[in-house]
Image (cartoon, grey):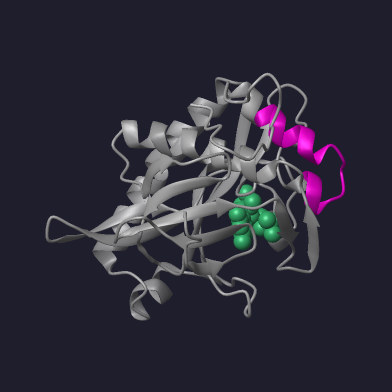
Amino acid sequence: MARRRQIYEGKAKILFEGPEPGTVVQYFKDDATAFNNQKKGTITGKGVINNRISEYLMIKLGAIGVPTHFVRRLNMREQLVREVEIIPVEVVVRNVVAGSMAKRFGMEEGTELPRSIVEFCYKSDDLDDPLITEEHITAFGWATPQELDEIVATTLRINDFLCGLFLGVGLKLIDFKLEYGRLWENEQLRIVLADEISPDSCRLWDVKTNEKLDKDRFRRDLGGVEEAYQEVARRLGILPESGPRDMPGPDTMQ
Ligand code: UDP
């Protein structure tokens, strides 16, 4: 097959033109970055695992009626998704204080929040993804008030669903980041969940020990990074016994 045209290369993924108009192939890399690109590294097998975890979670969310960009997984590192116009806003949900929130308010990591909090950041590496409010989003035209209402309502549903799903496998969903896009469907512009959901974009702590099983192991040099990603996949029941093999060829592992 001829090599597809590359549309975009991000920090953890590459996007290629899809086989039909309106589709895109998401290729998951092993590259990891943190602190706005200041820390760079590789997490062996991460791309394979995140491709699987994100597939699994997008399918589950689709099954409860959340519209997503996901079409199907193509192979170990690639999935076919619908082409969307990405809304340049990172939607962060927090259930427990961690990361930048702990720093911002001088709060201790691990403090339970009285209720889930939704935050927004403007997607801009140059500006270091600044925290913004709904006012900026609507005033600058990044989303209409109606779109934003839908994004918040969908995000809270996703949070409830994922909290339960992860709790079922002994993991606490501390916080996570979502991205949304818009696409035309039946003459209507629709908002759909896009990007990925994986241990790159979620904080996941073991329920009993509070052990971190996410990208914080990389960010904070805690060791056992590969093992943490594998453990999340294993608990979700989606890691093959032989581990995250990365074999070329038509080994699609359905
Ligand atoms: N997050 C992400 N991409 C970003 C920023 C944050 O996926 O560019 C995720 C991060 O993994 C965490 C949540 O969003 O699960 C909240 O991150 P936070 O604001 O605490 O920033 P961080 O400490 O990751 O810099």
- Residue 59: which quarter of the image? top left
Q: 26 above or below 168?
A: below
What's the residue at 59%, 45% (across, down)? Answer: 175
Query: Residue 159 location, x and y as percent?
Result: 46, 39
* Number of residue marks: 0
What's the residue at 71%, 27% (across, down)? Answer: 243
Query: Residue 137 location, x and y as percent?
Result: 39, 72
Query: Residue 108 location, x and y as percent?
Result: 76, 47
Left or right of residue 210, residue 6 in this image? left
Query: Residue 205 location, x and y as percent?
Result: 69, 33
Please state which of residues 10 and 123 is positioned toward the viewer in this rendering.
Answer: 10
In the image, the segment drawn in magenta is 217-232
Left or right of residue 96, residue 32 in this image? right
Q: Is residue 247 magenta?
A: no
- Residue 187: which quarter of the image? bottom left
Q: Is residue 231 magenta?
A: yes
Question: In the image as oriented, which residue stretches furthest toward the front?
Answer: 1
What's the residue at 50%, 54% (across, down)? Answer: 26
